[in-house]
Amino acid sequence: MKPRALRRVMNLWPPFLFSGVHVHRIAGDWRSAEVHLRSRPWNRNYVGVHFGGNLFSMTDPFWMLLTMNALGGDFIVWDRAGEIEFLKPGKGRVVARFVLDDATLDEIRAATADGGKHLRWMETEVVDAAGDVVARVRKQLYIRRKRDDTRS
């Protein structure tokens, strides 16, 4: 699926649609993405700020999707672990940006060259309109080259 089509599908996916998550952009080369979370009456908690689960879910699939597609079909990429640190109450629209650079992809390719698994932590900050960090999210990816089963 092309990034643009995936963005459209994700924006109609009920867990994102009904929680206020909007995939603003996925780059055509799978190297970056931007996701927004709008504050609505149905996605605020008892004290009027974003639910922590919504802050985590807005970041959930993106490191895996970007890495999987940027590396290509010769790799297996899975989410293995995740953690979130809440730093400030999230109010209004918040944004998460993901940028996958060449150096990271080169390190992953080198670490998996022998066919072994590679565990890599990726970090994203969720920021508010003032640019203040609301939450810091870390996702651990499991990455491995696919095995060649065409042995003679």
Image (spheres, grey):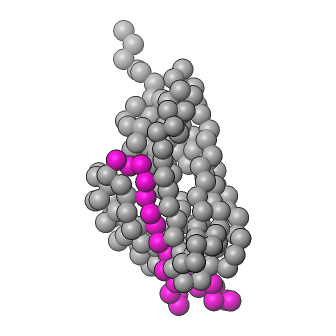
Farthest residue to the front: give it. 130
Residue, x 45% and y 24% (percent of image)?
A: 147
Relative to 128, does residue 152 appear above or below in the rendering?
above
Report which quarter residue 7 is drawn in: bottom left
Quadrant of the rendered structure where residue 75 is? top left
Residue 56: x %, y % from top left: 59, 66
Q: Which residues are drawn in magenta? A: 29-49
**In this rendering, is residue 53 above or below 5?**
below
Quadrant where the C terminus is found in the figure: top left
Residue drawn 31% across and 66% down?
8
The image shows residue 57 at horizontal and vertical percentages of: 54, 66
Q: Is residue 26 left or right of residue 40?
A: left
Q: Nearer the viewer, residue 104 or 61?
A: 104
Residue 45 highlighted magenta (yes or no): yes
Q: Position of residue 148 (x, y in %)?
A: 41, 21
What is the quadrant of residue 125 in the picture?
bottom right
- Total marks shown come to 0
Q: Is residue 71 left or right of residue 4?
A: right
Residue at horizontal 53 percent and vertical 60 percent from the top: 60
- Mark yes or no: residue 45 visible: yes
* Front position in the image: 76 or 138: 138
| Residue 99 x, y percent position in the rendering | 48, 52
* Residue 15 appearing in the image: no
Q: Is residue 139 magenta?
A: no
Q: Nearer the viewer, residue 77 or 85?
A: 85
At 69% from the left and 75% from the top, the residue drawn is: 88
In the image, is residue 64 above or below residue 50? above
